[in-house]
Image (cartoon, helix red, strand yellow):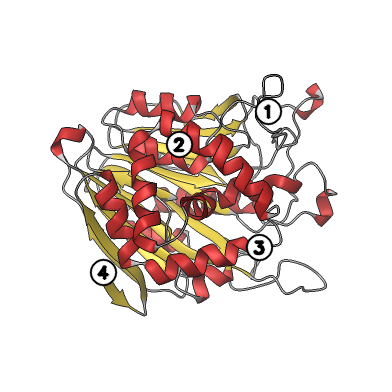
């Protein structure tokens, strides 16, 4: 494990799925134990007895069927970190479990403690997918994120390398693989997120579902973009989320996922003046998303689906990153392409600080409460070159580091 106070830990794991998980758990044992204990007492997560019921009766059997490789890796993390497997599932399912109050709270009372802004940039030199990841400052303050570099075995028939950014004990929140597939994810709240989990029985049987983070990891386990899309769309889930995917082959899609369905958003192509134009092979394009429904297919007037995002910075962060990237398009001569430095600068935007695209520590409420949020990390994946560039903390003040994988 690489240790440096300016950067998050970078660990490399090898072997079969269980061995990779075991190595992950052993290298980060005390950090994983600390994070699990934090989420066991997190006020926004249901009581542990209810979480344990969901994990044992729904998450675990569904993941074992949906992605046996991920299931074995989770078992390895549990053994390596000397924790029950249910607590490793808790770390990977934190996002899903915090949706418990989606249909119970007034909008102005709801907290927006897991927000992100994502973008894909396609130009004449390649494809980059990037995001700012906003989260509870506890994770940043206690250094509980990790760059996880997994090298698979030939017999598994998986991409040779998968590199992700996530919390310790997770299989990853965002990432890319050696086949040139990349993914970022944002929180998304809807009124149809479901927590109706009866006890298993002959008549009251809720379909088995997985935490949505495992669908993201399954996509990164695919060689083929089309197959990866099937796993994103077809993942059995009980809450929604936004997932942006891209491939080095100049394609990208944003999925606004809801239980049992989804909306899609495609990149917008722009000309040299920043004006929208029709797609073409050498064109420049951009795709952005924050944390509320924006697809043309979303219509609250239909009376079934409502966005439950409480407002706040999500309503302008996607506009800020779009503006900054289009500015970079206009300022960069044709042929050079948009550099990683230009993407980093775009994500460092400070408009409407402290709740900016690059967010300083703040309570996001007036009067202020004890809960503090911050951009815990910023990341740019260059899918064409196989380079991951990561910043610990808000990109306008943090330090950046590169990690390169070999593309196949």
Spatial distance from mark 4 to mark 1, Cα to Cα? 44 Å
Residue located farthest toward the bottom when viewing the structure as drawn: 5
For marks 4 and 2 on the same chain, the one whose residue lies earlier in the sequence: 4
Residue 17 shown left or right of residue 408 in the figure: right
Residue 144 shown left or right of residue 24 in the figure: right
For marks 1 and 3 on the same chain, the one whose residue lies earlier in the sequence: 3
Residue 134 sits above or below residue 67 on the image = below
Q: Residue at x 57, y 62 (%)?
A: 135
Foreground residue, 63 or 398?
Answer: 63
For marks 4 and 1 on the same chain, the one whose residue lies earlier in the sequence: 4
Spatial distance from mark 1 to mark 2, Cα to Cα? 22 Å
Few, some or many C-alpha atoms within 10 Å of disc 2 (few <14, some 14-19, many ≥20)? many
Residue 113 sits above or below residue 86 on the image = below
Q: Which residue is mark 1?
A: 298
For marks 2 and 3 on the same chain, the one whose residue lies earlier in the sequence: 3
Few, some or many C-alpha atoms within 10 Å of disc 3 (few <14, some 14-19, many ≥20)? some
Spatial distance from mark 2 to mark 3, Cα to Cα? 24 Å
Residue located farthest toward the front when viewing the structure as drawn: 202
Label 3 sits on a secondary structure element that is loop
Q: Which residue is mark 2?
A: 215
Q: Which mark is residue 1?
A: 4
Label 4 sits on a secondary structure element that is loop
Residue 324 in picture, x, y percent from top left? 49, 54
Q: Which residue is mark 3?
A: 42
- Find out whether the residues at labels 4 and 2 contact each other: C-beta distance under 8 Å: no
Spatial distance from mark 4 to mark 2, Cα to Cα? 27 Å
- Find out whether the residues at labels 2 and 3 contact each other: C-beta distance under 8 Å: no
Which image quarter is the C terminus in?
A: top left
Residue 220 in picture, x, y percent from top left? 34, 39
């Amino acid at each position: 494990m690489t240790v440096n106070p300016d950067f998050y830990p970078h660990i490399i794991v090898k072997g079969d799925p269980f061995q990779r998980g075991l190595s992950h758990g052993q290298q980060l044992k005390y950090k994983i134990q600390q994070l699990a204990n934090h989420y066991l007492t997190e006020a926004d997560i249901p009581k542990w007895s209810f979480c344990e019921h969901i994990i044992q009766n729904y998450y675990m059997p569904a993941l074992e069927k949906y992605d046996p490789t991920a299931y074995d890796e989770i078992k390895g993390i549990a053994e390596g970190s000397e924790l029950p497997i249910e607590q490793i599932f808790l770390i990977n399912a934190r996002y899903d479990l915090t949706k418990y109050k989606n249909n119970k709270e007034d909008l102005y009372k709801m907290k927006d403690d897991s927000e992100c802004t994502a973008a894909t940039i396609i130009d004449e030199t390649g494809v980059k997918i990037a995001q700012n990841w906003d989260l509870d400052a506890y994770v940043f303050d206690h250094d509980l994120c990790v760059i996880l570099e997994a090298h698979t075995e030939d017999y598994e028939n998986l991409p040779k390398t998968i590199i992700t950014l996530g919390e310790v004990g997770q299989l990853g929140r965002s990432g890319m693989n050696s086949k040139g597939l990349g993914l970022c994810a944002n929180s998304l709240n809807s009124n149809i997120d479901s927590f109706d989990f009866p006890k298993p029985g002959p008549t009251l049987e809720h379909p088995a579902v997985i935490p949505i983070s495992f669908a993201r990891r399954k996509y990164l386990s695919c060689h083929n973009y089309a197959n990866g899309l099937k796993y994103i769309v077809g993942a059995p889930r009980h809450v929604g989320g936004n997932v942006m995917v891209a491939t080095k082959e100049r394609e990208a899609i944003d999925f606004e996922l809801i239980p049992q369905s989804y909306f899609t958003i495609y990149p917008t192509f722009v000309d040299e003046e920043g004006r929208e134009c029709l797609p073409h092979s050498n064109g420049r394009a951009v795709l952005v998303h924050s944390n509320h429904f924006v697809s043309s297919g979303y219509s609250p007037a239909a009376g079934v689906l409502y966005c439950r995002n409480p407002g706040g910075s999500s309503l302008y962060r996607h506009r800020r990153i779009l503006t900054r990237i289009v500015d970079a398009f206009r300022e960069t001569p044709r042929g050079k392409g948009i550099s990683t430095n230009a993407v980093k600068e775009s994500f460092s935007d400070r408009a409407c600080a402290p709740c900016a695209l690059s967010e300083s520590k703040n309570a996001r409420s007036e009067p202020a409460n004890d809960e503090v949020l911050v951009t815990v990390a910023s990341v740019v994946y260059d899918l064409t070159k196989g380079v991951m560039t990561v910043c610990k903390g808000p990109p306008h003040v943090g330090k950046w580091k590169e990690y390169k994988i070999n593309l196949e």
